[in-house]
Amino acid sequence: MARIRLPLIPRGVRWVAVALVALVILSYSIVPAPGSGTFRTGPFGLLGYSTWLHLLAYGGLAATLAYTLHDTPRPDWQVLALVFLAVAAYGAGIELLQSTLTARTASYDDVLTNATGAGLAVVGWRLVTRYVRFYRARRVADLQVPVE
């Protein structure tokens, strides 16, 4: 089976990406978004807009962290369990922080939604990495995906 080759950028850059995603989530969790008091449905009309945002945010954080930890010497199941637990704990911590803010409200449903987003991303990561082979990119020229 053919594998897709993707670059694994330097570890320091990957950690900066994790920190940036976490900071974006934190900032949007502290400052109420415009129109956040009204209920709107998200794509496909299946879930509320807020639920979609939680799933995408924490799924994105989990995927970024899984990519960052991809080349660790630990077994995949340990790394992915750590990713899930870390992202779910971060989501719970954000909800605790929101409980102290007058302009925000904390919700157990949001904690579960955050954990669901992390869990879906971890499962997706495991499925995708079966078809991807990562190579170390040390220079900008290494980021070009070679054509086979």
Image (tube, rainbow, N blue to C red):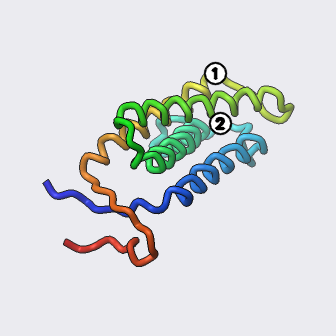
**Identity of the residue furthest to the left in this view:** 1
Query: Could you tell me which secondary element the residue under label 2 belongs to?
Result: loop
Quadrant of the image occupied by residue 5: bottom left
In the depicted structure, whether residue 96 falls above or below residue 146: above
In the depicted structure, whether residue 26 falls above or below residue 143: above
- Few, some or many residues within 10 Å of mark 2 (<14, 14–19, 20+): few
Closest to the observer: 59 or 71?
71
Horizontal side of residue 79 vs 126, given as left or right? right
Residue 138 rendering spot, x and y as whole percentages: 44, 69
Residue 103 rendering spot, x and y as whole percentages: 83, 35
Q: Which mark is residue 108?
A: 1
Residue, x 86% and y 31% (percent of image)? 102
Q: Foreground mark, 1 or 2? A: 1
Residue 38 rendering spot, x and y as whole percentages: 70, 38
Horizontal side of residue 8 vs 62, given as left or right? left
Q: Which mark is residue 95?
A: none
Q: From the image, tell me which residue sits under label 2.
A: 39
Residue type at mark 2 is Phe
Residue type at mark 1 is Tyr
How far apart are the two marked residues, 1 and 2, measured between alpha carbons? 18 Å
In the depicted structure, whether residue 95 falls above or below residue 142: above
Residue, x 42% and y 36% (percent of image)? 79
Residue, x 47% and y 36% (percent of image)? 46
**Identity of the residue furthest to the front in this view:** 73
Query: Could you tell me which secondary element the residue under label 1 belongs to?
Result: helix
- Few, some or many residues within 10 Å of mark 1 (<14, 14–19, 20+): few
Q: How many marks?
A: 2
Residue 70 rendering spot, x and y as whole percentages: 40, 47
Horizontal side of residue 73 vs 89, given as left or right? left
